[in-house]
Image (tube, helix red, strand yellow):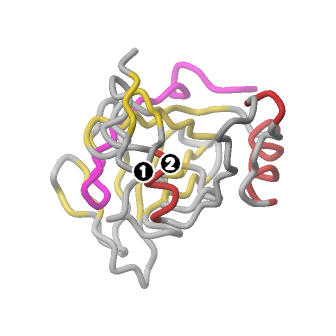
Amino acid sequence: MNLVKCENGHYYNAEKLASCPHCANEKIQVPVPDLTGARQSAVDTYIPEKQLSEKYKIAGACPLAGWLVCIDGNMKGDCFTLFTRTNCIGRDTSMDVALFQEPTILRYHHATITYHTDTAEFTLSTKQDSTSTVFCNEQPITPKHSITLAFHDRITVGRCTLAFIPFCCKDFQWE
């Protein structure tokens, strides 16, 4: 572990993070409790919004379908679970794929990935009125055309690149 102190006095593991996550949270105005001098066990777990706890209740009722792995960007190395429904990608913590350290991504609904149980396929799309840029394997995705995803497709949203890893497929589906 490479423990580093940022210019604002926060400590973070530089082997796992390119920059201070505390400073990043402050930039996007996520309140962080002051842990200076406090034992971490004495501080309650912080849930930023009621929606976040609701998201995990929903997730428990909906099985996983695959993953996105950040392979380039501020959250490089992080993994995000996709569920057997429509998964929203955005910067807000209420999004299914919450890329909260990526300032080039829209806060809400930059893109969506939907798992279709009837065809065992995943589709990537953007909203009809969206001005967001989304690419799959360097090809632009337009609001009028969604694309069917394949194993290891590269999805670029803003300056973040995600690798797509399906779990559910024609050979396996939840019953």
Q: Residue at x 45, y 32 (%)?
A: 12
The residue type indicated by label 2 comes to: His
Q: Nearer the viewer, residue 57 or 141?
A: 57
User: Could you tell me how far apart the alpha carbons at marks 2 and 1 are, in whole angstroms?
Assistant: 9 Å
Q: Residue at x 64, y 53 (%)?
A: 32
User: Closer to the camera, 74 or 97?
Assistant: 74
User: Where is residue 162, by image quadrant?
Assistant: top left
Q: Which mark is residue 8?
A: 1
For marks 2 and 1, give the one nearer the viewer.
1
Question: Which is more toward the observer, 55 or 137?
Answer: 55
| Residue drawn 41% across the image and 62% down it | 125
Percent x, y of residue 79: 47, 32
The kind of secondary structure element at disc 1 is loop
Q: Quadrant of the N terminus?
A: top left
Tag 2 and tag 1, C-beta contact below 8 Å:
yes
**Residue 160: horizontal and vertical position, in percent?**
29, 50
Q: Which residues are magenta?
A: 155-175
Image quadrant assignment for residue 144: bottom left
Percent across and percent down for residue 139 are 17, 57
- Residue to which mark 2 is pinned: 22
N-term mark: 2 or 1:
1
- Residue 61, numbered circle: none
172 in magenta = yes
Label 1 environment density (alpha carbons within 10 Å; few <14, some 14–19, many ≥20): few
Element type where label 2 sits in the image: helix
